[in-house]
Amino acid sequence: MSPVISMDSMNARCDVVVAGGGPVGLMLACELRLGGPSVVVVERRTEVDPTVKAGSINTSTAGAFHRRGMLPALAEVQRRSVERFQTFVRERQATNGTAGRPPRTPSRFAGHFAGIMLRGELLDTADPDFAHAGPAHDVGLVPQQEIERLLAERARELGVEVRLGTELTWFDEDADEDAIVVRPARLADGSGQAVHADRLVGCDGGRSTVRRLAGFAFPGTDPQITGHQALVEMTGSEALRPGWNATATGMYAHGPVPGRILTVEFDGPPAERGADVTAEELQTSLRRVSGAEVTITGVRTATRFTDHARQATDYRAGRVLPAGDAAHVHSPFGGQGLNLGIGDAMNLGWKLAAVVRGRAPEGLLDSYTAERHPIGAWVLGWTRAQIALMRPEPQARALREVVTALAGSVAGTTYFAKKLSGVAHRYDLPGRHPLVGRSAPDLELADGTRLADLLHDGRALLLGLADDAELRARAEGYGERVRLVTTACPDRPDLAGLLVRPDGITAWAIDAGGTPETGAGLGDALSRWFGTPDRPTC
């Protein structure tokens, strides 16, 4: 990670300050820039955090990057991830005396639930929810650090100002200027230049300074576990079983890359969450959970984690909004945190940009909480359920056997994968069409392009799949705010038109031969999401 603009050229005023330059903060900053506002990101780190974090993304997140033209870069990262997995397999084979066998290429990545791995070959790929995803469904093995690097480069290209080595220490509201005054500090000497901004978004993690200073309520449940995740050098690893393993004392995982270990113990939260994780601590935990006499000789990166699950009761307090872990925290199982945060950024970015630029009323921001809070609450429940299945108690282990059997079926794998991938989520939006409120299908159009290709610039899209003069007239009233494309989709003759928001959500749809009442809903959807037209429409 490197600065987009040097510390010496900082401006004292911008439209939006984003606190936190991780994947969520950078994604939000990029989305804001597509909508026009000036953005300053303040990040206390100076480099990408090497600590082992999320190792994959779900289909919804891959779809978000697909709509911004970044899917090929993700596919290349996935290719390298598969190579690392194959290296891990070769090392295991050499240790176990089976060297010479070609490493098995992993099947379609489907994720896991409470450490119960889902077998990709059992996934019903004909399920309509997956069929709508297009090429994004084939990309998943992308580590969080690579996401951050790709987004840092995109932020640079879009002109986002990123101030590294700088953290937000305080903010207040200037009633005279009708603005937020953000007071950051350089870590090195404690100095910093105040920034006046129209809005502040906290993407500064689970211990968010923005959330605390803004006074957001953050209720939830207390932690029950201490988890460790690390990349290490070790001897005796041949005694560890690869993948996820339930034992009499907890859970552990080994792989899918060389040296990666994870342990879960149900003895309450760590006494000192912020203390450095030592080789001795990791070794003691791994031996206790696995029963193997493993010796850790070196630690490349290591972290502790817990399962506290909390969520802000509202995602907006005046000019301040949280996103990502600043809005909700939970255990990392199932890899939901990064995906949930990217979804927040996609949902908020275009709305906040429209409000700041005066193209939409203030009330549009209320839909951020209305749409994203239920998804966050669902994720908290989903992760709590996994903790219950991981407990080393007879009742929990009996239930785990039942869930394992269900997950081993086509129907079970497809159910869990749809939940994990996010493809089944739907916002409660007005309209009766089954596509409304859901991620727009990545239609393959008559010229060989896909619907996602038409969303790279972050504008809304009105896609006419039939020759409809009224549809064209309504879109033309919104000028640059809504892009109109008239084409055909041979694979979906049943569809006549779609209105797709900048975040890829279907706001309106009509089937071929739709009723006049259904078609009239287009005007309502346009005004709801994009305000008053530039000139009268039909």
Image: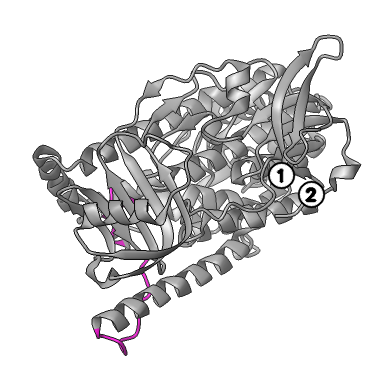
Q: Amino acid at mark 1?
A: Cys
In three-dimensional space, the C-alpha distance between marks 2 and 1, rounded to whole angstroms, equals 7 Å
Say which of 42 and 350 sits in front: 42
Q: Residue furthest bottom?
A: 100
Q: Which mark is residue 30?
A: 1
> Main structural element of the magenta stretch: helix, strand or loop?
loop
Residue 532: give x, y in percent of width and height.
76, 22
364 is higher (above) or lower (below) than 185: above
529 is higher (above) or lower (below) than 386: above
The residue that appears at 25% across and 57% down in the rendered structure is 287
The quarter in which the N terminus is drawn is bottom right
Q: Residue furthest front?
A: 280
Indicate whether residue 100 is drawn in magenta: yes
State yes or no: discs 2 and 1 in contact (Cβ < 8 Å): yes
The residue that appears at 53% across and 30% down in the rendered structure is 207
Q: Secondary structure at mark 2?
A: helix
Say which of 199 and 296 sits in front: 296
Which sits earlier in the primary sequence, circle 2 or circle 1? 1
- State how the image is colored: one colour
Q: Which mark is residue 389?
A: none
Say which of 271 and 120 sits in front: 271
Specify start and end residues of the magenta stretch as a single range.
97-119
Indicate whether residue 25 is drawn in magenta: no
Residue 537: give x, y in percent of width and height.
77, 27
Badge 2: few (under 14), some or many (20 or more) residues near its Cα, within 10 Å?
Answer: some
Can I make out residue 368 in this image? yes
Q: Is residue 72 left or right of residue 288?
A: right
Can I make out residue 488 in this image? no
Q: Residue furthest top?
A: 175
Q: Which mark is residue 158?
A: 2
The quarter in which the C terminus is drawn is top right
Q: Amino acid at mark 2?
A: Leu
